[in-house]
């Protein structure tokens, strides 16, 4: 340390300025204040030195020490105010750039959406154009034009979601056959996937809301052979497996003849996936299509059934529960 007391004051001033300017947090600032202005700090120590300064220099030295004290006190106060303002300001979030990034969660298509899209894509390759129709339908499109008479059990109030006297939530996508036949001129081939509603008791294989895929082809000279070939191509393309199909005689008011469609999956049994048939002339009549000239085939399948087979889902309720674990597994 310098023996010249004036030099020691200058040193203390330089060191104090640096210490207060460099104090970046409250703890460091308090330490600096202690080191210079505190009872055992450098400024009181210099004041003590006054006693040993020669009488001639006492006044000048005392003045220097007072200036030193005043400046450091001011510096301390200013720095304290600055740090206080910084503490009061909202702290910037701490970013640790060395941490690994957070992987964003990817969304995925619902298994029914995946299935519906695949159905439409496969039907497109077979020449069927996608179309659609409303879920709120009237009796004409849901029943009358489909040759379902007023006293038919399918029209029972207990078996349909009627909204009022005339309107209901459609119970089948066959309504789209009527809409297409009335809006377009044959030849035509259309397909539609959509929701249908029936007040069924919910269990592992029934729901009050499910989906159907509808297919309709109208041309000159179409036969059951065209229908069967289309269905076989459809299920083989959808399942990418050498499945077999069989048409089991059945009855639907809007087709004649009518059949149930069964699919044979290798190693498993026959599974019914829907109904089909040749468009009944009564339907053509109702929609203004000449049955003498045109013939057509149609089919309708349950999309949940197709998806349950495809994804090995044993319970139809899984599709509407929105359980993320289930949906992720089938993503
Ligand atoms: N609409 C019928 C149902 O919901 C299924 C069906 C059968 C559709 C025969 C058709 C068909 O297009 O030709 O049970």
Image: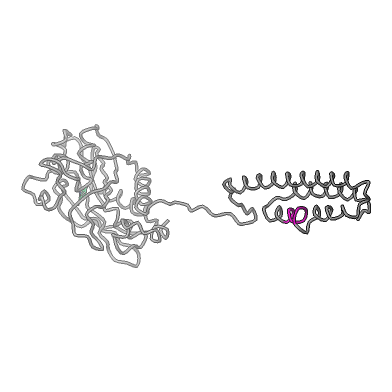
The one of 186 and 318 positioned closer to us in this rendering: 318
Residue 241 visible? The answer is no
* Position above or below: 46 against 140: below
Depth check, front residue: 252 or 48: 48
Please say if 328 is above or below 65: below
* 295 with respect to 1 (left or right): left
What percent of the width, then of the height, locates residue 53? 91, 52
Range covered by the magenta-colored residues: 31-38
| Residue toward you, 190 or 167 | 167
Residue 282 placement (x, y as % from top left):
12, 40
Q: Residue at x 20, y 53 (%)?
A: 259
Q: Is residue 37 magenta?
A: yes
**Residue at x-position 74% and y-position 47%:** 73
**Residue 105 painted magenta:** no
Corner quadrant of residue 125 = top left
Task: Identify the main secondary structure in magenta.
Answer: helix
Furthest toward the front, the residue is 55
Q: How many marks?
A: 0
Outermost residue on the bottom side: it is 267
Q: Position of residue 201 (x, y in %)?
A: 19, 59
Left/right of residue 126 with respect to residue 210 in the rendered view = right
């Amino acid at each position: 340390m310098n023996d010249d007391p004036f030099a020691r004051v200058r040193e203390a001033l330089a060191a104090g300025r640096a210490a207060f300017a460099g104090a970046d947090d409250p703890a460091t600032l308090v330490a600096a204040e202690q080191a210079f202005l505190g009872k055992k700090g450098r400024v009181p120590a210099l004041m003590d030195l006054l006693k040993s300064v020669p009488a001639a220099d006492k006044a000048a030295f005392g003045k220097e020490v007072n200036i030193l004290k005043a400046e450091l006190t001011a510096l301390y106060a200013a720095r304290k105010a600055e740090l206080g303002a910084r503490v009061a300001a909202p702290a910037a979030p701490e970013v640790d750039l060395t941490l690994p990034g957070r992987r964003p969660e990817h969304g995925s298509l619902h298994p029914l959406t995946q299935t519906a899209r695949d159905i439409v894509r496969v039907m497109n390759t077979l020449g069927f154009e996608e179309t659609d129709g409303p879920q709120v339908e009237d009796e004409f499109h849901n029943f009358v034009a489909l040759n379902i008479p007023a006293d038919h059990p399918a029209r029972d109030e207990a078996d349909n979601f009627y909204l009022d006297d005339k309107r209901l939530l459609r119970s089948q996508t066959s309504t789209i056959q009527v809409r297409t036949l009335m809006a377009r001129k044959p030849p035509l081939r259309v397909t539609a996937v959509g929701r249908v509603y029936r007040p069924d008791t919910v269990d592992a294989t029934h729901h009050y809301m499910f989906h159907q895929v509808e297919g309709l082809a109208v041309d000159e000279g179409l036969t059951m052979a065209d229908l069967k070939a289309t269905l076989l191509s459809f299920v083989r393309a959808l399942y990418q497996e050498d499945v077999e199909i069989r048409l089991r005689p059945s009855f639907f008011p809007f087709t004649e003849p009518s059949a149930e469609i069964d699919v044979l999956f290798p190693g498993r049994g026959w599974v019914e996936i829907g109904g089909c048939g040749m468009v009944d002339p009564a339907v053509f009549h109702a929609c203004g299509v000449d049955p003498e000239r045109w013939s057509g085939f149609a089919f309708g399948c349950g999309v949940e059934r197709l998806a349950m087979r495809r994804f090995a889902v044993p319970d139809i309720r899984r599709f509407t529960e929105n359980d993320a674990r289930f949906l992720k597994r089938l993503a």
